[in-house]
Amino acid sequence: MLKPSVQAPLITARGLTRVYELGASQVIGVDSIDLDIPEGEMVALKGNSGSGKSTLLALLAGLDRPTSGRLVVADHDLLEATEDDLTRYRREVIGMVFQSFNLLPTLSVLENVALPGLLAGHRKESVDRKAMDLLSWLNLSSRRNHRPAELSGGEMQRTAIARALINEPLIIIADEPTGNLDSTNGQIVIDLLAQLNREFGRTVIIATHSTLADSYATMELRIKDGALAESKCHP
Ligand SMILES: Nc1ncnc2c1ncn2[C@@H]1O[C@H](COP(=O)(O)OP(=O)(O)OP(=O)(O)O)[C@@H](O)[C@H]1O
Ligand SMILES: [Mg+2]
């Protein structure tokens, strides 16, 4: 039997719009974006400050809701989703990495990494084992009992990457992951994200002002004033 040659994209947005209400005035964060992202891409999301990159990523990650349009990610309709659906979606489908790391200061490295696994209801023993494997891969085993304040910036971001991976997400979304790092550590973080894409087939979406990810990106999206201005695919 013939297989369909074109798979449905992992991410489909149509007329995706997010308007912020500020008192009587409105600010457009994302403006009528139409977008298809197939599984397995490494996407570099570019655009000036204030162009809507973080807004778009927050919608894709299920951290925020669109005002209107359509957004389906891995068969999850994010406009129709209940709060519980979104919580599960964020936990199971998405791994998120932020510029400011967002680690919990009172927990150790190991506890930070394990937490989303425990929240997803997995057994502590297997979560801890997976967390230790991730820390070893990220060259952080010796830091497992440190608190975030006792780490370098690069170590904090690698801890955040381990935390993003603990539930084996289909999609890794990184918002300016190198913004608080020097160029050496920024390159290490981008290399790790590229390795997740190339060797482990994860779809990776990175909003960044830097050019560090350019050589790895299979797709480049540029947004301007909330609208998609350019979409380029690299072979
Ligand atoms: N919570 C909010 N309330 C009101 N307006 C917001 C909010 N968040 C973002 N905006 C506005 O939405 C627009 C897009 O902001 P966004 O943070 O998505 O830009 P960005 O491309 O990520 O910028 P940067 O490169 O500086 O991180 C901006 O005009 C911003 O002021
Ligand atoms: Mg931003």
Image: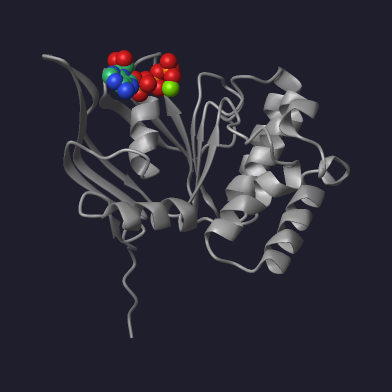
Residue at 35 percent across and 52 percent down: it is 86
Can residue 185 be seen here? The reply is yes
Q: Position of residue 47 (x, y in %)?
A: 39, 19
Left or right side of 83 for 174: right
Left or right side of 157 for 20: left
Quarter holding residue 132: bottom right
- Of residues 107 and 49, which is closer to you in this image? 107
Residue at 69 percent across and 36 percent down: it is 106
How many numbered marks have been drawn onto this rendered protein structure? 0
Q: Position of residue 225 (x, y in %)?
A: 26, 17
Give the answer, above or below, for where 105 lies relative to 226: below
Q: Position of residue 107 (x, y in %)?
A: 70, 41
Give the answer, above or below, for where 56 lies relative to 165: above
- Of residues 36 and 148, which is closer to you in this image? 148
Give the answer, above or below, for where 179 lies relative to 231: above
| Residue reaching furthest to the front | 106
> Which color scheme did the rendering employ for the protein?
one colour
Residue at 85 percent across and 47 percent down: it is 141
- Of residues 66 and 34, which is closer to you in this image? 66
Quadrant placement of the N terminus: bottom left
Q: Position of residue 148 (x, y in %)?
A: 72, 32
| Residue reaching furthest to the left | 24
Quarter holding residue 62: top left
Left or right side of 21 for 52: right
Q: Quadrant of ligand 2?
A: top left
Can residue 198 be seen here? The reply is no
Residue at 64 percent across and 42 percent down: it is 161
